[in-house]
Amino acid sequence: MHDLSKGISVVTGGAGLIGSATIWGLNNRGLENVWAVDDFKPGSLKERNILPLEIKDSIGVQDFRNLFRQDSSELKEIKTVIHLGACSSTTESDEEYLNDNNLSYTRELCEWALKNQVRFVYASSASTYGDGSMGMDDEDDEIEKYQPLNLYGWSKQNFDLHAKKAGWLDSIVGLKYFNVYGPNEEHKGSMRSVVSKAYEQIQETGEMTLFKSHHPDYESGRQMRDFLYVKDAVCMTLWLAENNQANGLFNLGNGKARSWLDLAHAIFSALNMEPNIRFVEMPEILKEKYQYFTEARVKKMESAGFLVRLFKLEDAVKDYVTNYLVPDLRLGQSHA
C-alpha cells in the first residue's frame, strides 16, 4: 500500500472538476498536505472550487513545470502526483497546444516521478476508444487498436502508447474516466455536463434540450453513456493512488450505460417537476464524431480489489442538484 499521508500530494488541474474534488476527497481523510497546481484568476469560478478546500500551497502550471524540469529540491517532499491537469475540450483544434498540455507535460512529469520514486497517477480518457466499435477494454495490450475521434482523444492516446512503449505502465496508473459530472464544474462553460446545463435551462425556460439521434439504431434520447458521479471518480482515483500493486490503464465508470432520457428524468425528479424535454439538431461539428454508446468494462478494477458500491444515477443526480446546484455550493462548503 502507498501511504497518502506521507509527504506532499500534488494534484494538477487542482482547481478543475475532478482535481478539486480529489483534494476534497483527501481533505475528507484529514489530509491537507496538498499542492494544487492550476492557473486561475482571483474571483474566477475555478477559484471558487479551491477556496473551501484545505491545501498547503497553490502553484501555477508553468512554475510547477519549471520546478520538475530542474529537478528542484523544493519538490523533495512530494510522494504522490495525481496528474489531472490538461486541456479537456473535445473540440479543441490546436494540435500543438494539445500536444504540449496533454502529451509533453504528462511525459515530463511522469519521467520526473519515476526517477524520484513518486507514485504517479494520471488522467487518460475514455475518448481514446473512439466510436466504441473496437470495444472499450482497458487491458494494456489492447490499446494500439483504438482510433480516437478527435485531437483531444489522440493527445491522450499518444501518451498511453508512449507509456506502454517505455515500459512505464507496470509502475504508474492511467485513468480512463468516462462521463464525469458533479459539483465544481461550472468553470467548464460549454464543456459542462448535461446535468449542469439542464439545471440552468430548466430554471430559465422550464424545459431542457437533448440532441436528436442521427443513428438508425438509437432513438432520440436513447443514446447511451456511462455516467460517473465525481464523488465516485474521486473514490476510485484515491483507491488506485493508494493501492500501488494496481498499475496500468483502468476504466473509471459505473459499468452500466444509461440513456440521456434516464438522466433527464432524474434531473426533473430531483427538482420535483414533470419532465419537459425538447429535441434539437446536433451541431454539424459533432455529427461525424458523436459517441452513441459508451460503457466502461470495469472487471479490471474489480479484479484489482475495488469493490465499493457506486452511486445509482438517480441518487447521484439528486445529490448534485439538491445539495450543490440549487444552493449554489461547491464541494467543501457547508449549507448555511
Image: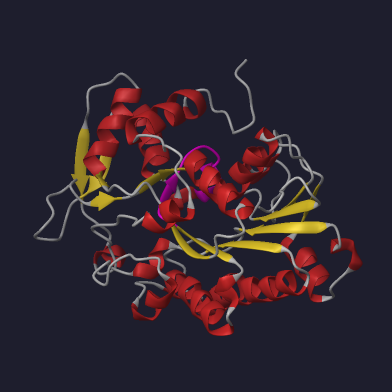
Q: Quadrant of the C terminus?
A: top right
Q: Is residue 156 magenta?
A: no
Identified at 66% across, 33% down, the residue is: 28
The extreme top residue here reads 336
- Determine which quarter of the picture holds residue 260: top left
State the image coordinates of residue 249 (x, y, percent, origin top left).
48, 66
State the image coordinates of residue 206 (x, y, percent, origin top left).
29, 27
For this rendering, which residue is in front, 316 or 278?
316
Identified at 21% across, 51% down, the residue is: 223
Q: Is residue 114 above or below residue 301?
A: below
- Determine which quarter of the picture holds residue 145: bottom left
State the image coordinates of residue 117 (x, y, percent, origin top left).
75, 68
Q: Report the span colored magenta.
A: 177-188
Say whether residue 120 is left or right of residue 150: right
The extreme bottom residue here reads 165
The extreme right residue here reads 73
